[in-house]
Image: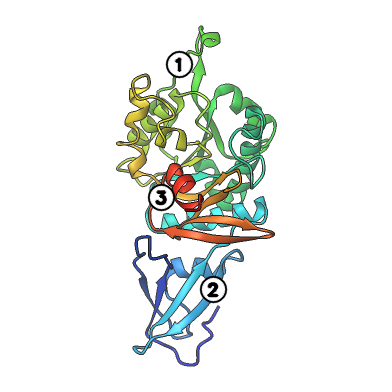
Amino acid sequence: MPLSITAITSKVLIAFPSLPTSKIVKPCTFPLKNDGNIAHPRANAFMASRSLKFVANSVFGDGSVLVAFNVPFPSDYSELLDQARNAIELALKDNRQLMEIEFPTAGLESVPGDGEGGIEMTGSMQLIREFCDRFISPEKATRTRIFFPEASEVKFARQSAFGGASFKLDYLTKPSFFEDFGFFERVKMADRVKLEDELFLVAYPYFNVNEMLVVEELYKEAVENTDRKLIIFNGELDRIRSGYYPPFFYPKLAKLTKTLLPMMETIYYIHNFKGRNGGTLFRCYPGPWKVLRRLGNKYKCLHQQEVMPSLKEVALDILTPA
């Protein structure tokens, strides 16, 4: 897609706008090819996406063109999955290794708990399959290992959403003899991973507190210091970030806020807030974090910043009027 400018300039400046109250996102400079296209895969991926708007805002005196990319809030799950796929592809080009995708599955405006737990997990499973079909090429399917919370979920996945798929399906934990009392056995990750594995996708590891501890083990033993990538899909990590699990009772889980989570890039994220002052916290990599409020059929951006705000900050400081 050539740029609609009269003269071919020497470079294009990519910037993401931010409000005065947020940190300024540093712009990136990309060269132009002779045909006027941006000579950088990250920019080309943006321009190829049907979900992203490409707008030339202004031309500087030195010949640079300021280009702003805007990812709208998705209108449905098909658009959401396309946006998430584009975001992941850009993150991989930036060599991100540990990534998170998080969004509600009971409806784009829903919050955790709106749907029954089992139904939400089943919805996530179906959406993960659709995401994989969009993102992972057939030749790489056998080098992709998808971890579900436990063995029973793997069995259900093979009989439903992942029936006939070439992806390797695996599990994080398995019930012990004392399953009725909430005890599960951790699976040694070194025994699950194979040499040819390139990508790990972990599906909704939040039902049991041990699941995220196993994810950390997976990252340390099979991803860190390798070329492999790990994506956590709908892990409800906000529970850990917000202190939902008291550190006194869950010290290992609380420790993840200082060990695993700081290394993670949240690639795609939607969290809704209900009530009179409701809204949405939205992010699509590499864009800023946006706080949106729905007005009819449109969303108005109330605030945006470079780093992820806490849910408490969004609810009390941004969505609640002074």
Colour setting: rainbow
**Residue 57: x, y in percent?**
48, 80
Mark 1 or mark 2, earlier in chain: 2
Of circles 2 and 3, the one toward us is: 3
Does residue 237 appear in the picture of this structure? Answer: no
Of circles 3 and 1, the one toward us is: 3
Left or right placement of residue 222 versus residue 142 in this view: left
Q: Nearer the viewer, residue 120 or 49?
A: 120
Residue depicted at 67% across the width and 53% down the height: 76
**Residue 20: x, y in percent?**
38, 65
Q: Nearer the viewer, residue 191 or 316?
A: 316
Callout 2 crowding tier (Cα within 10 Å): few <14, some 14–19, many ≥20: some
Does residue 103 appear in the picture of this structure? Answer: yes
Check disc 2 and report its element: helix, strand or loop: strand
322 is higher (above) or lower (below) than 250: below
Q: Nearer the viewer, residue 126 or 310?
A: 310
Label 2 sits on what residue type?
A: Phe
Q: Which residue is mark 3?
A: 308
**Residue 3: x, y in percent?**
51, 82
Label 1 sits on what residue type?
A: Glu
Label 3 sits on what residue type?
A: Met
Give residue 244's quadrant in the image.
top left
Q: Which residue is mark 1?
A: 185
Mark 2 or mark 3, earlier in chain: 2
Check disc 3 and report its element: helix, strand or loop: loop
**Residue 314: x, y in percent?**
46, 48
Q: Which residue is mark 2?
A: 54
Which quadrant would the N terminus be assigned to in this image? bottom right
